[in-house]
Image: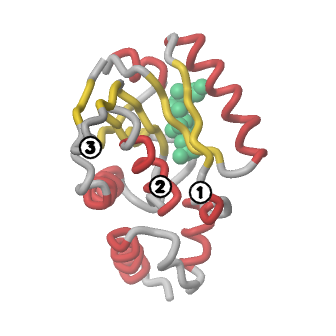
Amino acid sequence: MHSNGTSDGAVKRGHAVYPGSFDPPTNGHLDVIERAAAVFGTVTVAVVVNPQKRSPLFTLAERDEMLVSCTKSMPNVRVEHFRGLLADYVKRIDADVIVKGLRVVSDFENEMAFAHMNRSLSSVDTMFLMSDASYSFVSSSLIKEVYLQGGDIAKYVPEVVLEFMQHKRTTNGRK
Ligand code: PNS
């Protein structure tokens, strides 16, 4: 187990993996990362390579850059990529726990099956953080849809993501 002392004297233990597509990262993701980083010694934000989802808006390098930028104030957070099964990845990096955010009850059905499968394959448990209520409707896909149709998403994403989105809209010739 990893352990880190904190300025208030508390010792945070364990290595948590927070996996996702992060296409793009939202304030909801960042909230989960911050809360996980307050509990665990190390948090690895793990960006999945080649997700089932077709044609992501952002490249892996772009998602990596956005995540590194918006987590730079958290010294116990690092950003990595993984390919293939999450269960294999968490075993490979010797993680103690998978962390996921739950926004609404309907998230739970899929996540329960994922948690059981991942534990069955790797013996690594999944711990859930309830998303902050103010982000319960915020998802990467909705952010992309609203933004690319000209809507204001500034309060739902970190500043760096907004900049990347603006660049994407310009270079895609949309809006
Ligand atoms: O942000 P997302 O798209 O909801 O993240 C989904 C993710 C990456 C957590 C999930 O698709 C995943 O774990 N993919 C890796 C492949 C895998 O292990 N599949 C079996 C899950 S039990």
Q: Indicate the secondary structure of the residue bearing disc 1.
A: loop
Question: Is residue 11 at least partly visible in the picture?
Answer: yes
Residue, disc 1? 132
| Left or right, residue 54 beside residue 16 | right
Q: Residue at x 56, y 30 (%)?
A: 127
**Mark 2 or mark 3, which has the lower sequence index?**
3
Residue labelled with disc 2: 31
In the rendered image, the vertical position of residue 167 relative to residue 82, given as above or below:
below
The residue tagged with tag 2: helix, strand or loop?
helix
Mark 3: few/some/many CA within 10 Å (<14, 14-19, 20+):
few
Q: Say which amino acid is labelled 1.
A: Asp
Q: Residue at x 56, y 69 (%)?
A: 143
The kind of residue tagged 2 is Asp
Q: Residue 53: x, y in percent? A: 57, 47
Q: CA distance from mark 3 to mark 1?
A: 24 Å
Report the residue at 37% width, 21% height from top: 95
Estimate the spatial distance between the alpha carbons at disc 1 and disc 2, rounded to whole Å: 7 Å
- Residue 36, image x, y percentages: 43, 41
Foreground of the two, 120 or 77: 77
Query: Where does the N terminus fall, quadrant-wise?
Result: top left
Residue tagged 3 = 8
Display colour scheme: secondary structure
- Residue lying at 62% horizontally and 25% vertically, measured from the top left: 115
Crowding around mark 2 (Cα neighbors within 10 Å: few <14, some 14 to 19, many 20+) is some
